[in-house]
Amino acid sequence: MKFAHLMRANLFRKKTRLVLTISSFAIALLLFGFLAVIRMAFSGGVDLAGADRLVIINRTSIIQPLPLAYRDKMLRIPGVKDVTHFNWFGGVYKDPKNFFGQFAIDVANQRQMFPEFKVPEDQWQNFVKDRTGAIAGAATAKRFGWKIGDRIPIQGTFLPGTWEFTLDGIYHANRSGDDETQFWFQWDYFEEKVPDRYKGMIGWYYVKVTNPDDSVKVAKAIDNEFSNSAYETHTDTEKAFAAGWVKQFGNIEFLILVIGTVVFFTLLLITGNTMAIAVRERTAELAVLKAVGFSDRFVLVFVLAESLLVAFVGGAIGLGLAKLLTLGGDPTGGFLQIFHMPVSVVPWGLGAALAVGIASGILPAISAMRLRVVDALRRV
């Protein structure tokens, strides 16, 4: 650290150039942070999927229903521990832009199936007793300013009419990245109001298996149970189901990788050129350092340290801005339900910035190390 003043003097020799170089790193790492957030938004469900849960849908399509009678048959299959079911509602709250997932749930088995979603016991019991009650995720409740006891009108879409709900509880997720945007209400209330053709039918099932290692075997047994029936099933692990859902949007990870590579390669060229110019400007000073006894290795490390310092400062600023700008949650009105920058992005981002710092500074540093005092002074 005793050479910090010398390094500071060199860096601030051209203040405008220093600010622009740091800004380049900051912008690149800001984009890096946002790309990580987008990747998390699309693939977070895959990463967080339960290892012991299966998703069962109609083999034709998820929009085709399955009979409620399948539940008891599934419970008799070896390896099945719990079964619950969902119906998609798809209503509108005040404005069609106010998108969030609304589900008619199996109250008796919801909490056993999804222990990561926490509802205070008193709120849950009020919900169980209230035929028109509802539970909202913390993010959705915050978004609309809902509080316990509010009456929430949802305008049906494929099931027309206004459905009135009382907010009996708010659930929170105990893992960072879990979905806190859902809206649950009682399946019995849903079943009571739907037309006769929909009665006794559900959207899809979730199954919890006794041993996660047997998930594939249990999934095959479930599909075999209902093969050649009027409502054949397609069963996947929750992770596979979530991954298939993400693939409908295209290869997001490849797109992010391409964008990130282009950005950092461009940054490498910019900073490499900047460091090369800085070394050329200080040829005489570097020659003097060598003349008074500093080694070639010292000059190499000294020049490289400047490049790394600029990369670190710019990277830290960029990642800090990315985290700050994503604290407000999903800006897409519910399309990206998981929208936050994971803490793990910080070391990866700083590592990438430092790698660019090394790559852009190594050639100028080697050039400075090989500089001969006689040749340098002759140029001056």
Image (cartoon, grey):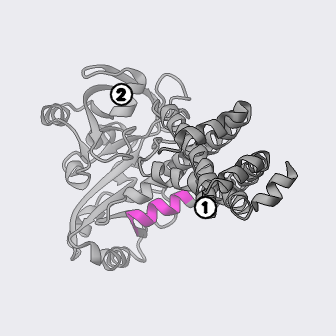
The residue lying toward the viewer, choosing from 11 and 186, is 11
The residue lying toward the viewer, choosing from 377 and 260, is 377
Res. 118 visible in picture: yes
Left-right relation of 122 to 341: left
The total of numbered circles placed on residues is 2
The residue type indicated by label 1 comes to Ser
Left-right relation of 186 to 255: left
Instruction: Kindly check if marks 2 and 1 are in contact, taking CB atoms under 8 A apart as contact.
Output: no
Residue at mark 2:
141
What residue do we see at 70% from left, 34% from top? 13
- Does residue 201 lie above or below 310 as drawn? below
What residue do we see at 59% from left, 41% from top? 6
What residue do we see at 76% from left, 62% from top? 372
Res. 162 visible in picture: no
Pair 2/1: label in front: 1
- Does residue 60 lie above or below 256 as drawn? below
Please report whichever mark, 2 or 1, sits nearer to the chain's N-terminal start.
2
**Quarter residue 69 falls in:** bottom left
The residue type indicated by label 2 comes to Ala
Q: Is mark 1 on a helix, strand or loop?
A: loop
Residue 105 image position (x, y, % from top left): 30, 45
Q: What stretch is highlighted in magenta?
A: 236-246
Residue 1 image position (x, y, % from top left): 47, 45
The residue lying toward the viewer, choosing from 53 and 370, is 370
Left-right relation of 74 to 162: left
Residue density around tag 2, few if under 14, some if 14–19, many if 20 or more, within 10 Å? many
Q: How far is the residue under mark 2 from the one under mark 1?
A: 64 Å
Residue 192 image position (x, y, % from top left): 30, 39
Query: Which residue extends farthest right?
Result: 379
Q: Does the magenta stretch include residue 272?
A: no
Q: Magenta stretch mostly in which secondary structure?
A: helix
Disc number for residue 295: 1
